[in-house]
Image (cartoon, rainbow, N blue to C red):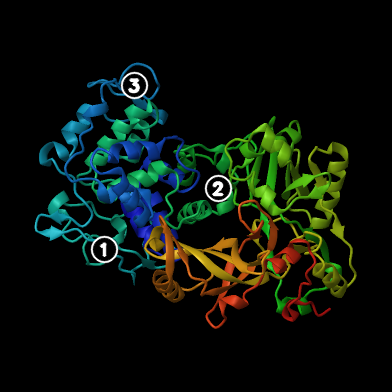
Amino acid sequence: MRAFARLLDCLVYTQSRNRKTALLGHYFRSTPDPDRGWALAALTDGIPVRLPLRRMLSDLTGRFIDPVLYQLSRDYVGDTAETVALLWPDDPVDLSRQTNTPTPSPQGGGEWSEGSRAPLAHGHDYQTQDDIRRTSPLSSTGKSRGRGEKLGEKSLQLSLDLIPTPNPSRQEGGELSGGIFAHVVDVDIQQQDGPRPTSPLPSTGMGRGWGDAGHNSGAEPAYLSLGNVIGAMASGTAAERTVRLGQFLNALDASGRWALLKLLGGAPRVGVSARLARTALAEAYGRDVSEIEEIWHALEPPYLDLFAWLDGRAERPDPGSKPVFRPVMLAHPVEEGDWPKLAPEDFVAEWKWDGIRVQVSARGGDVRMFSRQGDDISRAFPEIRSAFQGHDCVVDGELLIMRDGEIAPFNDLQQRLNRKAVTAKMMAAYPPHVRLYDLLFDGQEDLRALPFSERRTRLETWYASHHPPSTDVSPLVAFTTFEDLNVLWSSSRAEGIEGLMLKRRDSAYQAGRIKGQWFKWKRAALTLDCVLMYAQRGSGKRSSYYSDYTFGVWQEDADGGRQLVPVGKAYSGFTDEELLLLDRWIRNNTVETFGPVRAVDPGIVFEVAFDAVHASTRHKSGVAMRFPRIHRIRWDKPAAEADTLETVLRLLSGGSEVTVDDAARPTR
């Protein structure tokens, strides 16, 4: 847990993508199984343990802090794990009040008694309660160590020293990317924990070097390993697992407590996406990330077979007949300078539909649907799984909501996204539809190396033969010159389309953005001048600032008066310096408070950019924006001159004229 905590700390304070990749790569190479696999799971799909964590933490914190004070602290800090880690007392919390029932083993049978040992999946054991009492630092000192607390006469400090160091070897060969590494510096930490083994990365002479991040070594007892913690929390009643969680929190310092809760919470939020974690793993072992992504969904945590392959101890895992994700091909935005280099006869055009890109993989009687990032979203769309049942293919397409042949607004699709289960009522109200772009596999035949024109012919032939329900093929857009295409592009907003795609006729299907092959020509963003109405404190590093803004437009009353009605919310599009100015203004112009939310005088105008407007029952105005972001702050504009609801409603009905930026027009 200590090594995992150091890794998360470094990731939080590291902005550079290359440095994050280097940190992750070193951790994966230097940490033993199964801990590195559990860490990888935490950073990607989450560990396969479902806990009522919020309720458990409420129970535990209620033993030593007033619930209202805890909620206020959580609201101000902006992160549950950080709040609990810092609030947890130095003296062990009394957990005896709810330990009247015996604790069962992870298999669910028998009891976890004082002398029993319950096995963990993959052949690993987690420690008994006797082990915890015997090895825990609490047994002798009666205290856990907090972040920054005294170690003898010296204090523990975390700092990041981003300086160049010699490139370390990768198993006697190769280099980690970058050459600049983050260093975790603990002042005189050896005074507490004793000597450390030599790091595979060089020290900087400033205490323990970056190379020590990732070692489960030193005085930390084995029962605090990630594998042991996950095994202990894998099963049992909520009350029993609450006690176990409390025991682990009692045994850890503040950094360890924070890492523990990040591990169990399912969303570490340390600036690392699932794809970046997989990319770091691939780069650390000299592999292409597509090699990992193509077998990823056939693997299970803690990924012992994956690491055995990467370490050279076994063959690459074979997904066999499982439906797995194939990395998608992406497009570059078309720029002004691209048009003179492009020939119309080399390209085909497709509409860019206003949904989300998906890949449907049907193999061996099972069907999965993945997002473009490789996330499995099948459970939220059982209709699509049923539609492809019995087929053997991998198709690329756009997920939409469609009623009576008409594409519904993107807001309707959002009602189905990110749901673990859907009701019959929701399925009837928001029927999904996949509009097909490409055929990647026809049975066992891999078509990705074929030119797009041949894959398109194969797709049309396949669809004519199979015709899965809730699907159709995206039509090609006929054109002779780019000027012809520009006329169609200009009218795309009125047709409810996001823009156009340009694809080279001879382009193979390759993972990622391949320069010069595919282009996306999105419609220009709309803008409105809106008035700031409410502000709320953000989360994480913005938890002390009012950074989430609700804004509105003017609506005329029946008696000729005017009032502001909300149309959207945004928390991006401004600099840190502007955030400070906005935060100060909000605090000085608050007229009413609602918990963490402040209502303000109508004094600041935002020029808000957005993609579309749609009907909404959430706002008093009856409309809401899609993807709103603050384009600029109109310090110079009086609030009374902001836009009106009438203007917004014209956009909703498609009656507005969209101006095309001349710089985005093709020249041929």
Q: Where residue 640 sits: x, y (%)?
A: 59, 76
Quick one: 514 or 603, which is closer to the camera?
Answer: 603
Q: Earlier in the sequence, mark 2 or mark 1?
A: 1
**Which mark is drawn over residue 313?**
none
Q: Nearer the viewer, mark 2 or mark 3?
A: 3
In the image, what residue type sits under mark 3? Pro
Q: Where residue 107 sits: x, y (%)?
A: 40, 22
Residue positioned 18% across, 35% down in the render: 135
Disc 1 crowd, CA 10 A, few/some/many (<14, 14-19, 20+): some
**Which mark is drawn over residue 203?**
1
Q: Where residue 178 sits: x, y (%)?
A: 43, 67
The residue at which mark 2 appears reads as 292
In the image, what residue type sits under mark 2? Ile
In the figure, is residue 480 to the left or right of 648?
right
Where disc 2 sits, the SS reads helix
Residue positioned 23% across, 43% down in the render: 220
Quadrant of the rendering where the N terminus is positioned: top left
- Tell me if residue 170 can be seen: no
Where disc 1 sits, the SS reads loop
Disc 2 to disc 3, C-alpha distance: 37 Å
Q: Where residue 68 sits: x, y (%)?
A: 31, 46
Residue positioned 61% across, 52% down in the render: 618
Asked whether disc 2 touches disc 1, contact meaning CB atoms under 8 Å apart, the reply is no
Q: Earlier in the sequence, mark 2 or mark 3?
A: 3
In the image, what residue type sits under mark 1? Ser
Q: Earlier in the sequence, mark 1 or mark 3?
A: 3
**Which mark is drawn over residue 104?**
3
Asked whether disc 1 touches disc 3, contact meaning CB atoms under 8 Å apart, the reply is no
